[in-house]
Amino acid sequence: MSYRANASGQHWRRRIWVIVAVMVVPGAIVWQVFHSRREFPPSAFTAFVSRTICSGTFVSGLTPNQVYADTIRPMRGVEQINWALRYGVDLSSHEVRASLGGLFESIAVFREELGCILVHGDAPPRPSNTLPTVVQLAPKPVPEQIAGPSVTEPADPRLRAALDRAFAESDQAPLRRTAAVVVVRDGRIVAERYAPGYRVDTPLLGWSVTKSVVNALVGILVHKGVLSVDNPAPVPGWREASDPRHTLTINNLLRMTSGLNIDETNREYDAVARMILAESDMAGFAERAELKEPPGAKWYYTSGNTLILSRIIRDAVGGNARDVIAFARRELFEPLGMRNITLEFDAADTPIGSTYMYASARDWARFGALFVNDGVMNGRRILPEGWVRYSSSQTLDSPYAAGFWLGSKRWRTQWRMPSDAFFASGLLGQRVMIIPSERLVIVRFGNSHGPGYDIQGFGQLVSEVVEVFKQSR
């Protein structure tokens, strides 16, 4: 697939000037837009576009135009350069290319079982049909279904009204773009709804909800005696006693108190953006960061911590993508009945546990149910005893726990959150609320670009659902 500017005219000089005008001027204008705003360089933006459209198309099964319209175009600043953005999808080679003004081209490739990966440098990733390391695990019967094959319509009119409000849009931007809501009570779906284009089995990008899955995989390894949260993180480059990072623990990484200098602002081309969009070995990049605070002294949210944990998991279960997939399926996904799962990897075979796991809304609800049930599913203990309490306990004076969020005190008070409520949260409003005392899991996924990614709307949804069941007692 290629992009070519058309030139016309009989004289060769005119042709040259037309080529310059068509190819160079748009690129220069695009560069000026990005440079003046001191945000993503054009190459990073096209990398984000190609990867997002690749996964949305080949993993989620959405149309490329829908992925662009819902996820990319509403982002801050995109409208200014929308005229210059070009993207194309090659269905036969499972490839997406994106460019700006015909320049800064980025390529993302889909690999069966491994999702999409950005192509860095001249060596493309192995094509999906020649991956010898990926194993196909035969589906096993799900011990207990949470719902039938059709969308579960709420029997209670108050739940229907809560769903109506969760999907309602105002006349002004930014739109909420709710894609899916699933409510699980006592292990069964009692209400769910999907936006047009989404189904009960559509894999949805978790963004940072994926960090909570990394929490669970670490918990499983702790339960098996392979890891300990209080021991120094097993990172080879930190082992020397002279290295100030050698005392940094897995607990520090889970709680975002590592002290590593890996900035994440979600507003500019910071260290995390570079790690995700420009590095082939993401965990290696994060592991090279120096300390800016002593471990445990200060809470600072950064996806770099979770990429390091992802590498630790990879190494603990065998060292490559095949082993990670087999481990996650055997120990977590299959026992929970999660089926529509894609965990994406970087070129170093490390799962991108900070950001890139896809699962259906029902599967995200199944994941939440594990934490409602204190780490036990169908009589099998998957997480260590006390792990849920550990995962939901506050870190320092932050709104964070360990791979999960608690939310601010003001927000919890405003929406009357039960004292034991905690949630997984991701960019653009992906959230999984877990309330053990109410036996509730509330999943909300979408593409909300407004302040807080519709955290207020999520608070209202949770508050209304909890109130329904309190009044029904």
Image (cartoon, rainbow, N blue to C red):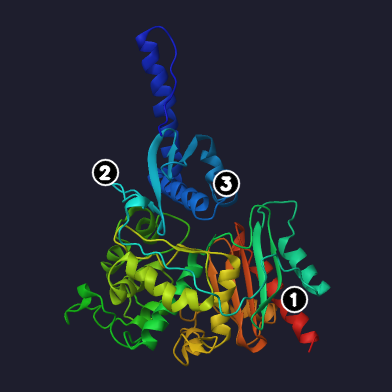
Q: Quadrant of residue 15?
A: top left
Q: CA distance from mark 3 to mark 2?
A: 28 Å
Q: Nearer the viewer, mark 2 or mark 1?
A: 2
Q: CA distance from mark 1 to mark 3?
A: 33 Å
Q: Earlier in the sequence, mark 2 or mark 1?
A: 2
Report the residue marked by disc 2.
122
Q: Residues within 10 Å of mark 1 (few under 14, many from 20)?
A: some
Residue at the extreme bottom: 385
Please tell me whether mark 3 sits on a helix, a strand or a loop. loop
Report the residue marked by disc 3.
63
Task: Look at the picture and state if 36 lies above or below 395.
Answer: above
Q: Are marks 3 and 2 in contact (CB under 8 Å)?
A: no
Report the residue marked by disc 1.
464
Q: CA distance from mark 2 to mark 1?
A: 53 Å
Please tell me whether mark 1 sits on a helix, a strand or a loop. helix
Residue 210 visible in the picture: yes
Three-letter amino acid code at disc 1? Glu
Residue 423 visible in the picture: no
Q: Earlier in the sequence, mark 1 or mark 3?
A: 3
Q: Nearer the viewer, residue 464 or 454?
A: 464
Residue at 60 percent of width and 69 percent of height: 362
Q: Position of residue 434 (x, y in %)?
A: 60, 80
Point out the image quarter for the N terminus: top left
Left or right: residue 320 compared with residue 272: left
Q: Nearer the viewer, mark 1 or mark 3?
A: 3
Three-letter amino acid code at disc 3? Thr
